[in-house]
Image (tube, rainbow, N blue to C red):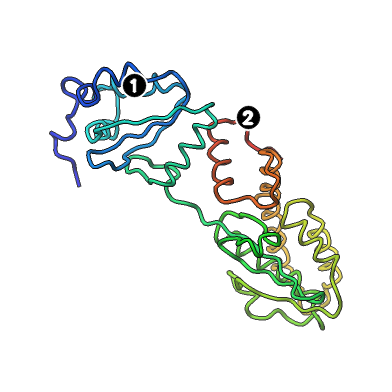
Amino acid sequence: MPQPREQLDLLTSENPLLMKLGEAFWNEIPREPGVYRFLSAGGDVLYVGKSGNLRARLFSYKTAKKTSVSRKIIRLIRSTERIIYETCASETEAVLLENELIRTFKPEFNSANKEPETYYYIHLMQPDENKIGLELRMSAPEEIRKNCYGAFKGHVPVRSALGAIHRTLHHYSPGNSSYPATLTRILTPRLYIHHFDAPVPVLKRMLTHFLSGQSCEFLRLREALITEDKSTSLFNCRRFEADSVLLNQFYEVRSRFNFLIRSQLEIHDHLLTQQEFDDYLVMARHFPELRIRF
């Protein structure tokens, strides 16, 4: 709905923040890194921001004129009744706190980081020595945490790669029979258990290293295995190539990427939480030197 002209023409005279907050507020703002929140008359968080110099950043709102700022900023200033801030030890801490507050309050005037991405964990199960199961989960509860890997970002890419993993494991199944229908769909099942004729400790170890981003030997094993199976009914050149792309992308963009994030941020847990993943991406946008390079 178009805004009334009188609502858009807000800063025709003195900036309203001067009158609302008073000179004492402006005199006390420190020049330290920190995070600030603009609040409405009812106490709702309208906007969250961060700065390496709180005083300089907040003074830019105090001196804003309608000819030099966007209509969005003008509306924010008009809607604000109170500003609160807190200092941080560094700009890095301010970035992380800002991200946390935006996720928590989802302020009206913030556009980025308000809606969480879809993240998954993959639970590697082994009911007994002759079975391997994979379960796609939205969380990693404590009782299964040690056997979960992730968090992996993206709904379709993760589920599609999981299907390629299942089809690779199926080549070890007794009789090497045709794929079950559930393993040929675009989005394979969230839980599937493979049965084998003998214990498969090496296969499980390779899969563990693949999901944790430590090694891509599972991909090399797959290449050798499929090459031997070209004469069987399971081999389909087009599907093989498509699955190769899915698995290589999953390893480089997800499991290996997570491994490097944990290493760079010195996270000793084998799991990367959704918040840690999200925080890293936010930090990488603000501090290019932190971006992971393969």
Horizontal side, residue 1 vs residue 265: left or right:
left
Q: Are marks 2 and 1 in contact (CB under 8 Å)?
A: no
In percent of the image, x 61 and y 66: which residue is there?
Answer: 136
Front-most of residues 111 and 101: 101
Front-most of residues 205 and 177: 205
**Mark 2 secondary-structure assignment:** helix
Residue 198 horizontal/vertical position (percent): 86, 77
In percent of the image, x 16 and y 23: which residue is there?
Answer: 12
**Mark 1 secondary-structure assignment:** helix
Horizontal side, residue 37 vs residue 8: left or right:
right
Q: Is residue 73 positioned above or below 245 on the image?
A: above
Crowdedness near tag 1: few (<14), some (14–19) or many (≥20) residues, C-alpha within 10 Å: few
Residue 181 horizontal/vertical position (percent): 64, 80
Residue ID for mark 1: 60
In percent of the image, x 24 and y 33: which residue is there?
Answer: 81
Residue 29 horizontal/vertical position (percent): 37, 20
Choose the circle earlier in sequence order: 2 or 1: 1
Q: Is residue 287 positioned above or below 281 on the image?
A: above
Which residue type carries mark 2? Glu
Crowdedness near tag 2: few (<14), some (14–19) or many (≥20) residues, C-alpha within 10 Å: few
Residue 245 horizontal/vertical position (percent): 69, 58
Q: Is residue 7 positioned above or below 27 on the image?
A: below
Q: Which mark is residue 289?
A: 2
In percent of the image, x 19 and y 43: which residue is there?
Answer: 2
Cα–Cα gap, marks 2 and 1: 27 Å
Which of the two marks, 2 or 1, is nearer to us in this view? 1
Q: Which mark is residue 127?
A: none
- Numbered marks: total: 2
Please state, as top left, top right, bottom left or bottom right, where the C terminus lies in the image. top right
Which residue type carries mark 1? Ser
- Image quarter of residue 133: bottom right
